């Protein structure tokens, strides 16, 4: 149900369910959500499914579930209900029909019987003359007899909007400033197709008006549609909402963001183990910035600071490294239990966790996650970092690493730790820390001389998790075995 809200700010996200929720759509949804929540307004989610062939319920479900995953709730609309429903365009055909009839009756629209071939020929000839392809109005002034004759030929008409000639339509855009369009370049456009289904430009106006939308915040690619929509508002005598068109998202090579630049749908990021708070933080910075150096923001903090004034006009650049950096940050900061829960499915996939999750197993997995999460850009990477804890023996990763084991006193270090481990009952963090400290003291060696060979013997690497994390994870048997294996190779 819709909540009672303090003011008349009402925004909407109106996706076409023709695929999963993409980065660009998610950003539009987020900016609308932020605007509504910042101002205590209403956020609507409705579905633009007039492209019957490409729309599906599956895509709709995907979009809604990605919105929920991102933490973007809505007050009114699809699945939430409210006083202005239905919220799916194919269920609103009766509403569009009334307004189409009104526009027809008042002369703002007319039936057009032109065939595909006729339109294609017109297009070709305009292009050949170097002109913008547009409809030149062949059916603008048909008389009844003409219409009867064309209908008798079996032609099914579309309804076109009669674009007034010689006018300038100015969009007063909250992000881009005033942008003007000449009506002469527009051409009479279709508002209802021959199958009775309205087109986007028509249905969106009816919906935005009848749902009381105050601000239309959407992607820049719709800016060129806006003059058409404004003309419909004017024809119906309706108040025009405020518009804000947010910039394109480009890949790092400055071409339009596409699959070539990495995953484009939100669910793909979810499946790779990106956290919603990292996605939201990242999406917000695609075109918005609060000023200053800070880049880490919770949804709540962004909401408090959000304004359209700080939305950039120039294109946003999708930088996967930045997303990885943010996600790594949130993986390290988050509650360990949560990261463990989220990691388990990946570990199962990798075969590193099998069977029933017993409390002991869970404790071990938790320790494992705590040890490796520092190195992850996303949770699906976890398997490459845990492998070393599962294999029987490890080899030094490269020649430089191998060299560490050739230094003086290495056997002494490995051997002493082996003895200490053998005589220790509980291999917990504190005991290991103490054992390592006393080992250095007893042998009169400095930290690095102790830790390096041990780390190489136990993990095969020179860098990585702390030994007091590694040893409890490996357990007594594996630790001793690895130390002995390393000694046998020296
Ligand atoms: N259905 C349109 C889209 O997905 C929405 C356009 C609008 O917000 O007006 O791009």
Image (cartoon, grey):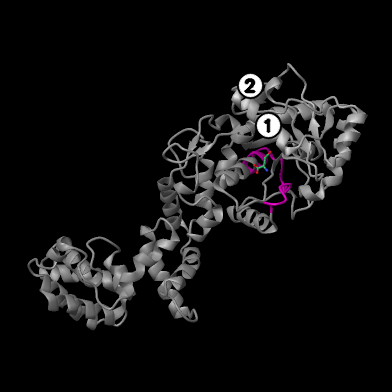
Q: Quadrant of residue 427?
A: bottom left
Dot 2: element: strand
Tell me: residue 90, above or below residue 193.
below
Distance Cα–Cα, label 2 vs label 1: 35 Å
Nearer the observer, 225 or 139: 139
The answer to whether 190 appears left or right of 404 in the picture is right
Magenta stretch, residue numbers: 33-55
Pointer 2: residues within 10 angstroms few (<14), some, or many (20+)? few
Mark nearest the camera among 2 and 1 is 1
Image-based side of 229 in relation to 143, left or right: left
Residue 152 x, y percent position in the rendering: 89, 39
**Residue at position x 44%, y 39% in the image:** 294
Q: In the picture, which quadrant includes the C terminus?
A: bottom left
Quadrant containing ligand 1: top right
Helix or strand or loop: what does disc 1 sit on?
A: helix
The tag earlier along the polypeptide, 2 or 1, is 1
Query: Quick check: marks 2 and 1 in contact, CB under 8 Å?
Result: no
Please name whichever residue, 107 or 174, is drawn nearer the observer in this view of the structure. Answer: 107
Q: Does 365 sit left or right of 440 as displayed?
A: right
Can the viewer see residue 324 in this picture?
yes
Residue behind mark 2? 178
- Residue 42 highlighted magenta (yes or no): yes
Image spot of residue 459 (x, y percent): 25, 69
Whether residue 401 is situated above or below residue 155 in the rendered picture: below
In the foreground, 164 or 237: 164
Residue 131: percent from the left, percent from the top? Answer: 62, 23
- Which residue is at the front of the view, 18 or 449? 18
Q: Residue furthest left?
A: 408
- The residue to which callout 1 is attached is 121
């Amino acid at each position: 149900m819709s909540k009672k809200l303090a003011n008349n700010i009402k925004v909407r996200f109106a996706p076409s369910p023709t695929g999963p929720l993409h980065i660009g759509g998610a950003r539009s949804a987020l900016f609308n959500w932020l605007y509504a929540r910042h101002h205590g307004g209403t956020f609507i989610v409705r579905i633009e499914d007039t492209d019957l062939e490409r729309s599906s319920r599956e895509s709709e479900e995907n979009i809604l579930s990605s919105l929920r995953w991102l933490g973007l709730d809505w007050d009114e609309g699809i699945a939430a209900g409210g006083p202005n429903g239905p919220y799916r365009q194919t269920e609103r055909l009766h509403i569009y029909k009334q307004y189409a009839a009104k526009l027809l009756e008042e002369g703002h629209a007319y039936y057009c019987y032109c065939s595909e071939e006729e339109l294609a020929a017109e297009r070709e000839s305009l292009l050949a003359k170097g002109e913008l392809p547009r409809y030149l109005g062949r059916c603008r002034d048909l008389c009844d007899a003409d219409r009867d004759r064309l209908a008798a030929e079996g032609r099914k008409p579309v309804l076109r909007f009669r674009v007034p000639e010689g006018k300038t339509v100015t969009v007063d855009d909250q992000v881009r400033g005033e942008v003007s369009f000449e009506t002469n370049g527009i051409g009479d456009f279709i508002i209802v197709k021959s199958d009775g289904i309205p087109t986007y430009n028509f249905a969106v106006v009816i919906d935005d008006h009848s749902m009381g939308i105050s601000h239309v915040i959407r992607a820049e690619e719709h800016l060129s549609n806006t003059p058409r929509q404004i003309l419909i508002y004017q024809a119906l005598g309706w108040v025009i909402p405020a518009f804000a068109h947010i910039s394109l998202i480009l890949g790092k090579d400055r071409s339009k963001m596409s699959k070539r630049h990495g995953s484009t749908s939100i669910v793909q990021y979810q499946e790779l183990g990106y956290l919603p708070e990292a996605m939201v933080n990242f999406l917000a910075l695609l075109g918005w910035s609060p000023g200053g150096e800070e880049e880490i923001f919770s949804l709540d903090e962004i909401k408090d600071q959000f304004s359209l004034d700080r939305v950039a006009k120039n294109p946003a650049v999708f930088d996967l490294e930045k997303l990885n950096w943010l996600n790594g940050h949130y993986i390290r900061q988050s509650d360990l239990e949560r990261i463990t829960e989220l990691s388990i499915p990946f570990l199962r996939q990798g075969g590193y966790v099998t069977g029933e999750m017993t409390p002991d197993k869970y404790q071990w997995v938790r320790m494992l996650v705590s040890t490796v999460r520092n190195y992850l850009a996303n949770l699906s990477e976890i398997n490459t970092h845990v492998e070393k804890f599962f294999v029987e023996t490890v080899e030094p990763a490269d020649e430089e690493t191998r060299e560490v084991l050739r230094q003086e006193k290495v056997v002494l270090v490995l051997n002493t730790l082996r003895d200490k481990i053998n005589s220790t009952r509980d291999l917990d963090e504190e005991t290991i820390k103490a054992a390592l400290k006393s080992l250095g003291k007893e042998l009169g060696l400095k930290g690095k001389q102790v830790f390096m060979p041990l780390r190489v013997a136990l993990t095969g690497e020179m860098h990585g998790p702390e030994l007091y994390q590694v040893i409890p994870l490996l357990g007594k048997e594996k630790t001793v075995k690895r130390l002995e294996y390393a000694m046998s190779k020296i």
